């Protein structure tokens, strides 16, 4: 038996494994012609097939199969030439047929990986066991958000039979071992699927969600511990909080000599705790068997080749290209490629930009700030990349100062106007005439004799104040560097 002191000092390895679910953005559902519309009124996008009426037969959506394969290719998977659909049997109010059409022993894609930069600074290739295609269930709407309060639930079958891919990680191949890496994995997974164009991954719409499996084992041992699965997580923050709680809960159990039960749990978002839902099912509990209404799917290798060739540039390749072609710092390249719309915007700007370094800085610092303040995504930016590139070129050429450029940018963001028109209308062109600048400098010096005396007595710090006064008088149209030079010359300071 362990002593109390040893129990208290026991250390554990954490093993985290995700089952990620992403709804595919096909025009219609997986086995019927109903529109795949996330915002449709409740139960308005249904038919006998997706609501499981007797005698209704499924017809496979070819586009959904292609999207599943495309996702597998983006995750470095092998594509199986022969695949089969199976019935996964369980009973729940949002599952009208009493079973879900899914895949079991013959999925479309297997044996892949997703590369992430771990908290230890190393690249980790987290194993992907499989990517399979299935139909989504309906959606339950509860009258009470609390798990402890009685109420009623309504069901919306619009989501029933929406095409869904499930991406199952392989906990035996470079597994996730920290909460930080777990979040990085989910964020990278979402990024890759959006780049691949197979899913919008709107977490607030339930288009990207996950089940997370957590187990602990004493450090130095190889045998995996019993796991708990936390179901239906659709927020990075809640995943992080659930993991932190579950790791602490399991470590407390193991230190006290109690077993960790293999079970399914839910996360209470208000109390930030996981609660038992049911004992964990294994595959036999679902009574999988081949769906008799669907034939096996033979994938032509030429189709796979075509899909591979049509794959867009994925985030890792794109960030590498930005560093290589534009000499951007890696951190800037990673920020620009975090979202495909931002990366596309940058690429289109870079075609006509005279100063890509300034372009990158203005997107990350200035444009991101305006978008965040307005709660907008890049897709909703009020102006296009050509207009933004023209603004950056105006700043880079000295036609306008950086201060004036930010004034123009704010006006562009408000009204979507052309930067050239704003510059002309507001008279923002830079003052390049030294005579005119010297006149303003002399005026500022005469208005601030005390500051001048302090500078001449050996305290140069107030020079910045004088520069600011000149910039104010010129409405930001003067070059701050040139203003400083003229001030120092007038003050006879080297």
Image (tube, rainbow, N blue to C red):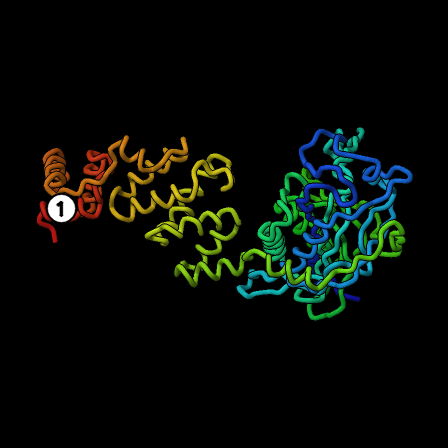
- Residue at x 77% of width, y 57% of height: 227
Q: Nearer the viewer, residue 454 or 337?
A: 337
At which x and y percent is residue 43?
76, 31
- Residue at x 68% of width, y 41% of height: 27
Q: Quadrant of the N terminus?
A: bottom right
- Residue at x 80% of width, y 29% of height: 152
Q: Is residue 148 visible?
A: no
At which x and y percent is residue 267?
72, 44
Relative to 448, is 301 above or below? below
Q: Nearer the viewer, residue 100 or 420?
A: 420
Q: Nearer the viewer, residue 457 or 37?
A: 37
The residue that disc 1 covers is 486
For disc 1, the neighbor class at 10 Å (few under 14, some 14 to 19, many from 20) is some
Q: Secondary structure at mark 1?
A: helix
Q: Is residue 243 left or right of residue 30?
A: left
Q: Splitting the image into 4 quarters, where does residue 9 fall?
A: bottom right
Relative to 472, is 11 above or below? below
């Amino acid at each position: 038996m362990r002593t109390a002191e040893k129990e208290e000092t026991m250390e554990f390895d954490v093993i985290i494994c995700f089952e990620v679910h992403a709804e595919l953005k096909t025009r219609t559902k997986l086995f019927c012609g109903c529109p795949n519309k996330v915002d449709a009124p409740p139960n308005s996008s249904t038919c006998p097939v997706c609501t499981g009426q007797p005698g209704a037969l499924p017809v496979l959506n070819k586009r959904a199969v292609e999207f599943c394969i495309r996702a597998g290719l983006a995750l470095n998977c092998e594509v199986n030439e022969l695949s089969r659909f199976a019935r996964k049997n369980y009973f729940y109010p949002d599952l009208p047929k009493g079973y879900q059409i899914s895949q079991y022993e013959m999925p479309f894609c297997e044996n892949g990986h997703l590369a992430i930069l771990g908290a230890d600074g190393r690249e980790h290739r987290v194993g992907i066991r499989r990517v399979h295609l299935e139909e989504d269930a309906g959606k339950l709407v509860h009258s009470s958000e609390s798990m402890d309060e009685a109420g009623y639930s309504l069901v919306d079958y619009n989501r029933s039979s929406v095409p869904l891919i499930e991406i199952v990680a392989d906990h035996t191949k470079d597994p996730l071992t920290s909460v930080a890496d777990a979040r990085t994995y989910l964020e990278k997974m979402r990024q890759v699927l959006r780049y691949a164009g197979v899913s919008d991954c709107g977490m607030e719409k339930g288009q990207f969600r996950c089940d997370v499996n957590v187990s602990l084992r004493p450090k130095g041992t190889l045998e995996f511990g019993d796991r708990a699965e936390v179901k239906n997580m659709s927020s990075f923050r809640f995943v992080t909080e659930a993991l932190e709680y579950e790791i602490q809960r399991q470590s407390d159990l193991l230190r006290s000599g109690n077993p960790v039960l293999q079970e399914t749990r839910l996360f209470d978002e208000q109390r930030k705790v996981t609660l038992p839902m049911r004992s964990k099912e294994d595959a036999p509990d679902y009574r999988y068997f081949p769906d008799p209404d669907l034939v096996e799917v033979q994938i032509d290798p030429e189709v796979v080749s075509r899909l591979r060739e049509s794959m867009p540039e994925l985030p890792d390749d794109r960030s590498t290209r930005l560093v290589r072609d534009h000499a951007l710092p890696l951190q800037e390249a990673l920020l620009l490629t975090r979202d495909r719309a931002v990366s596309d915007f940058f690429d289109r700007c870079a075609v006509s930009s005279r100063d890509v370094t300034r372009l990158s800085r203005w997107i990350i610092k200035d444009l991101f700030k305006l978008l965040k303040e307005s709660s907008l995504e890049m897709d909703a930016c009020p102006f296009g990349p050509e207009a933004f590139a023209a603004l950056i070129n105006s700043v880079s050429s000295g036609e306008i100062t950086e201060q004036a450029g930010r004034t123009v940018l704010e006006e562009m963001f408000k009204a979507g106007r052309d930067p050239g028109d704003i510059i002309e209308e507001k008279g923002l062109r830079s003052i390049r005439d030294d005579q005119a600048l010297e006149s303003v400098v002399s005026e500022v010096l005469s208005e601030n004799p005390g500051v001048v005396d302090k500078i001449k007595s050996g305290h140069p710090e107030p020079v910045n104040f004088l520069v600011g006064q000149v910039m104010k008088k010129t409405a930001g149209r003067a070059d701050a560097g040139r203003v400083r030079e003229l001030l120092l010359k007038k003050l006879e300071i080297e």
